Amino acid sequence: MGTDDTGSEDGTAQGLTFSGADLSHLDLCYINFKVANLSRCNLARANLCCASLERADLSGSVLDGRCANLPGVKMLRSNAEGASLKGCNSEDPSGLQAHLEGASLKGVAMEGSQMTGMNLRVATLRNAKLKNCNLRGATLAGTDLENCDLSGCDLQEASLRGSDVKGAIFEEMLTPLHMSQSIR
């Protein structure tokens, strides 16, 4: 395989430090950023399709833009605290879903993002701004949604079982919530 945009010959950037780097508009598909330091990076409009960001530090990073592609991205136990993911697209026609199970997304801005079927199980989304997001069929079971703004979201068929929704804002919902979706 030839050299990719990260300078690696095998598509791996595992454990490397990119803190503060401008990686915007790059095609970073399938790159292994496992345990990498991507804090305060500009990843706006980067294509991260199927990239591994497991346990990566994305705190304070910018992943904004309708073209910021996240289908199939793996962010298990990653730290994206204070990151901006406004208008991100995690939808994939093939059904490959983004996986953010256990991720720390405290205070993240994700307004208007497409997150259909995304796995956010036991993630921390405290104080997050998820206004007008498509979370249809998303797994939010056990997720910390305290003080989260979910105004205008589509939560149809989303699993909220065991989620902490204390202080969460559910105004102008596209579909009504059912008691079976949330038990707290």
Image (cartoon, helix red, strand yellow):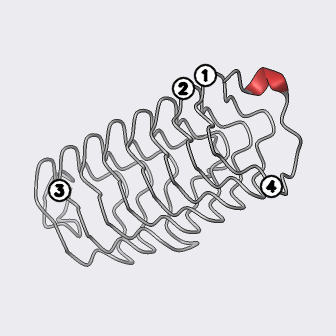
Sequence order check, earlier mark of 2 and 4: 2
Residue hosting label 4: 171
Q: Position of residue 20 (x, y in %)?
A: 19, 73
Residue denoted by label 3 = 37
The residue that mark 1 highlights is 162
Q: Is the residue 18 above or below the residue 37 in the image? A: below
User: Mark 1–mark 2 contact, CB under 8 Å?
Assistant: yes
Residue 45 appears left or right of 56: right
Report the mark closest to the observer, 2 or 4: 4
Residue toward you, 45 or 61 = 61
The residues bearing labels 4 and 3 have C-alpha atoms spaced at a distance of 36 Å
Q: Which mark is residue 142?
A: 2
- Residue at 39 percent across and 62 percent down: it is 83
Seen in the picture, residue 23 relative to 170 is either above or below; the reply is below
Kind of residue sitting beneath label 2: Gly
Give the mark nearer the N terminus: 2 vs 3.
3
Count the labels in the image: 4
Q: Secondary structure at mark 3?
A: loop
Q: Which amino acid is tagged 3?
A: Asn
Q: Quadrant of the C terminus?
A: top right
Which amino acid, by three-letter code, is at mark 1? Gly
* Mark 2 crowdedness (10 Å alpha carbons): few <14, some 14-19, many ≥20: many
SS at mark 1 in the image = loop
**Would you say 164 lies left or right of 106 here?**
right
Sort mark 3 into few (<14), some (14-19) or many (20+) by Cα contacts within 10 Å. many
Describe residue 119's horizontal placement relative to residue 152 as left or right. Answer: left
